[in-house]
Image (cartoon, grey):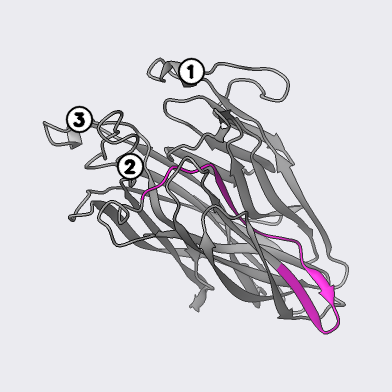
Amino acid sequence: MCEHRRVDPIYLWRGFRHEWLREVLGFRLPHRISRLHSFIDDEGAFRFAQSTGVDGNYMRPRGRWTALRGSGLAVERREVSLRWHDEVEGPVPEARVALREPVRFAPPPGAEAFAVLLHGFRLDTRCCDAHQPADRPCNSNGFWPVELGLRVGEGRREGGEVVSELEVELARGWTPTRGGVPFIEEKPLNVRLDYALEVGVTLLSGPAAQLRATRARSEVFGSARAPTRVTPVERAADAERPLATGLTGFRFAFEAPGSAPWLRRRGRYLTTLDFGVDAPRAGEGGATVAHRAGVWIPRSVVGTDLRAEVESALLELGPGAEVTHGETEGSLCIHSSDQAPFFSHWKKTGPGVGPVQSVDRVEI
């Protein structure tokens, strides 16, 4: 649906950090992805979701946001809904998809300037036995990621509209250890997987005197065992104007750590996903914006290199605009299913762990 509104305040999504916290035998417990949500709803609350599959775990997910108040600023939000299924191919099996979807906005009269930004996403996956070969039934609804990325283009004017392109990249594969311990407790790679992805896209618009947007991109490379990389990005800007930031894209890809066939299987269990952009810091003649990019795997997972990207927009606002930056923390806790092995079976609630829930909504 499409709705043009003048609201107070205008909320911008600046990214997320999801980190599983439970340890087993001194190792942080990782998981596949089967549900991953981070977005701000229409009532101004942050929504979080993630699930584990078999083993129980808990986290304190974080959502980064900015609230704007400014004369002449308007916001239009679209939710792009994508549905597809994939299929693994190749001697080193992987399944991948690259999608492009136009997003159209109708800015109000007098909107001379605009910025197109991500507003969050909801990703859910499901394995359906009816879509699998008869001799290879579903193993799990989750997947071992190889690549994942979302990006919105800067946008262009077409008549009375602003048109941007939403780009989605997703690839999955098997792990070097075939999903577990070879020949002892392996987890098969689903041949096909069904995806439901909802991506929120925001158009912020206003008079030229009230809004100027410039983009920047950063890329980092290194071990997936390293903590989140924080990359300062210098921007030219009028430091006398109120400044804000929004996230326009993020992406990561694992790179095979060797040429042996088993190492070329790039899928991995994950413990942490952390992508976002910090509040800007004004300086002489410009501003510095820190990009955060991190995917972390524990020592119990075969090591790999990581290439990660972040893209953001710096927003220079007009006189009198008010900007507030913040982070919101949620609580997710999931008990082990009956299929969990005895040594990792886990069912806890209470202080430090939280109530049992795979989704959470927290007012900003």
Percent of width and height locating residue 281: 81, 69
Q: Which segment is the magenta one?
A: 267-289
Q: Is residue 210 visible?
A: no
* Mark 3 vs mark 2: in front: 2
Foreground tag (1 vs 2)? 2
**Secondary structure of the residue carrying numbered label 3:** loop
Mark 1 or mark 3: name the one nearer the start of the chain.
3
Whether residue 84 is situated above or below residue 76 in the rendered picture: above
Q: Residue beneath label 3, please?
A: 137
- Numbered circle sitting on residue 177: 2
> Nearer the viewer's eye, disc 1 or disc 3?
1
User: Which element type, helix, strand or loop, lies under badge 2?
Assistant: loop
Q: Position of residue 266 (x, y in %)?
A: 35, 53
Label 1 Cα crowd, 10 Å radius (few <14 / some 14-19 / many 20+)? some
Residue 345 has which mark?
Answer: 1
Asked if residue 316 lies left or right of residue 186, the reply is: right
N-term-proximal mark, 3 vs 2: 3
Instruction: Tell me the distance, in whole angstroms, between the alpha carbons under discs 1 and 2.
Output: 22 Å
Quadrant the C terminus occupies: top right
Which amino acid type is marked by label 1? Answer: His
- Give the residue displayed 52% in from the left and 34% down from the top: 29
**Mark 1–mark 3 distance (CA, rounded to whole Å):** 24 Å
Residue 229 located left or right of residue 1: right
Residue 175 falls inside the magenta stretch? no
Q: Are marks 1 and 3 in contact (CB under 8 Å)?
A: no
The residue type indicated by label 3 comes to: Pro
At which x and y percent is residue 272? 56, 45
